[in-house]
Image (cartoon, rainbow, N blue to C red):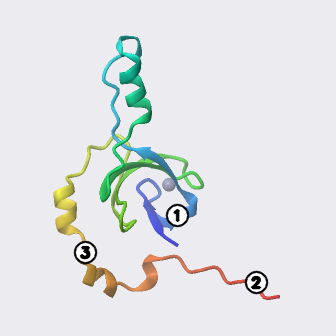
Amino acid sequence: MLLIKCPYCEEERPELEFRNAGEAHLVRAAPIVDQSDDDFAAFLYFRQNPKGLQFERWRHIHGCGRFFNAVRDSVSDKFLTVYKAGEPKPNIEQLVAKAPTPAETAAEPEQKRAPRAKKAEV
Ligand SMILES: [Zn+2]
């Protein structure tokens, strides 16, 4: 099971405590009454959904309940960083430079993942 660090609780918790809330840093361009239907539909429904690094909103729904942002690689499912809502976007190039190489990741102990639940004995 994947562990995600909540920037408010400041601890890693199982992914089951969290819910993805979509793309982060969405900004509405103009008041709704000034937007065309097509522009509003594009704002409401269209997302970038890139393959690789993306900015996402997450909610610690079974913890503190707060929203936060994360940079996650959609290919490897690894979180590069998490940060509180309202904080500026981190520089992705700096995060990639600091990220461990695949060899370093393979050498990490299994403590990054939560232990599996034991099956009930029958
Ligand atoms: Zn939390």
First reached walking from the N terminus: tag 3 or tag 2: 3
Cβ–Cβ under 8 Å for marks 1 and 3? no
Q: In the image, which disc is placed on residue 100? A: 3
Say which amino acid is labelled 3.
Answer: Pro
Q: Secondary structure at mark 3?
A: loop
Mark 1 nearby-residue class (10 Å; few <14, some 14–19, many ≥20):
some
Residue located 54% across and 51% down the image: 64
Does residue 98 appear left or right of residue 107 in this picture? left
Q: Quadrant of the C terminus?
A: bottom right
Residue 63's place in the image compared with 101, above or below, is above
Q: Toward which corner of the image does residue 7 lie, by quadrant?
A: bottom left
| Residue 59: percent from left, percent from top | 50, 49
For mark 2, does the 10 Å Cα neighbourhood hold few (<14), some (14 to 19), or many (20 or more) residues? Answer: few
Label 2 sits on residue: 120
Say which residue appears at 57% left-offset and 51% top-offset.
61
Query: Which residue is at the front of the view, 48 or 18?
Result: 48
